Image (cartoon, rainbow, N blue to C red):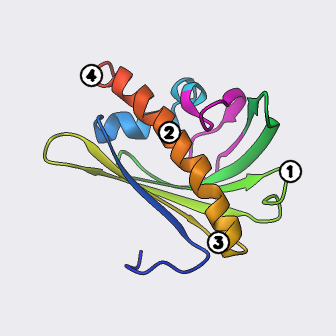
Amino acid sequence: MSATLADDELLITRTFDASPALMFSLWSDINHFRKWMGPEGFNCEEMEMDFRVGGKYRGMIRSKEHGDNWFHGEYVEIDRPHRLVFTWRWEQGPASDTNTTITITFREEADGRTTQIFHQTPFTSVERRDSHVGGWTSLFNKLAAYAAQHQGKD
C-alpha cells in the first residue's frame, strides 16, 4: 500500500483491545461475524460463509430505517492471523455496480492490542468512496465493543 491514497481507495486504521488471533477470528468465524456485522442500528440476519481461498460468502444486514441490504464476495487470500483479502459487492443500491477488494491487515502492538488496517478499492468516485466511511466506521464501533467482550475468551 502506498503512503498516498488514490481517489478510488478507502483506508481506515483503528486499534482494538484484542489480540490479532481474536480479531482475525471475528472476521473468519461465522458465529462471531454475525454478531457484529453491520453499522450501528443494523443486525446481520442472514450469513453464509465458506471460509477458504476461493470460497464465497453472502449475507444480509437489516435496519428499520434502511431495510434489507444483501452483500456477497469471495475470499482471495487468507494468512491467519495477519492478513485477509476478499471481494465485496452490494447486491442493490448505487454501489451495486462495483466489485471492490477489501484487504485487512492485523498488526500486533507491543501492548497486545491489534491495529487493523482496512483498505477497500476501487470506488467509482470520491463521493462513492466517502459515502462508505461512515458505515465502516460505525461497523468498527460495533466490532470494537464485541472484541472487548471476547478478549481472553478464545
Q: Disc 1 marks which residue? A: 92
Q: Earlier in the sequence, mark 4 or mark 3?
A: 3
Q: Earlier in the sequence, mark 2 or mark 4?
A: 2
Say which of 68 and 103 sits in front: 68
Q: Disc 2 marks which residue? A: 27
Residue type, label 3? Pro
Q: Disc 4 marks which residue? A: 152
Q: Earlier in the sequence, mark 4 or mark 1?
A: 1
Residue drawn at x 67%, y 31% is 42
- The span shown in magenta is 36-58
Residue type, label 1? Gln
Q: Are marks 1 and 2 in contact (CB under 8 Å)?
A: no
Q: Earlier in the sequence, mark 1 or mark 2?
A: 2
Quarter of image, res 47: top right
Task: Residue lying at the far left in this picture: please name it.
Answer: 110
* Alpha carbon distance from label 1 to label 2: 23 Å
* Alpha carbon distance from label 2 to label 4: 17 Å
Quarter of image, res 13: bottom left
Q: Earlier in the sequence, mark 3 or mark 2?
A: 2
Q: In the shown orientation, is residue 55 left or right of residue 148? A: right
Q: Please name which of the two marks, 3 or 2, marks the residue nearer to the observer.
A: 3
Q: Disc 3 marks which residue? A: 122
Could you classify mark 4 by the number of other residues whose Cα lies within 10 Å: few (under 14), some (14-19), or many (20 or more)?
Answer: few
Above or below 125: residue 103: above
The kind of secondary structure element at disc 4 is loop
Q: Please name which of the two marks, 4 or 1, marks the residue nearer to the observer.
A: 1
* Alpha carbon distance from label 1 to label 3: 17 Å
Q: Please name which of the two marks, 1 or 2, marks the residue nearer to the observer.
A: 1
Residue type, label 4? Gly
Say which of 64 and 27 sits in front: 64
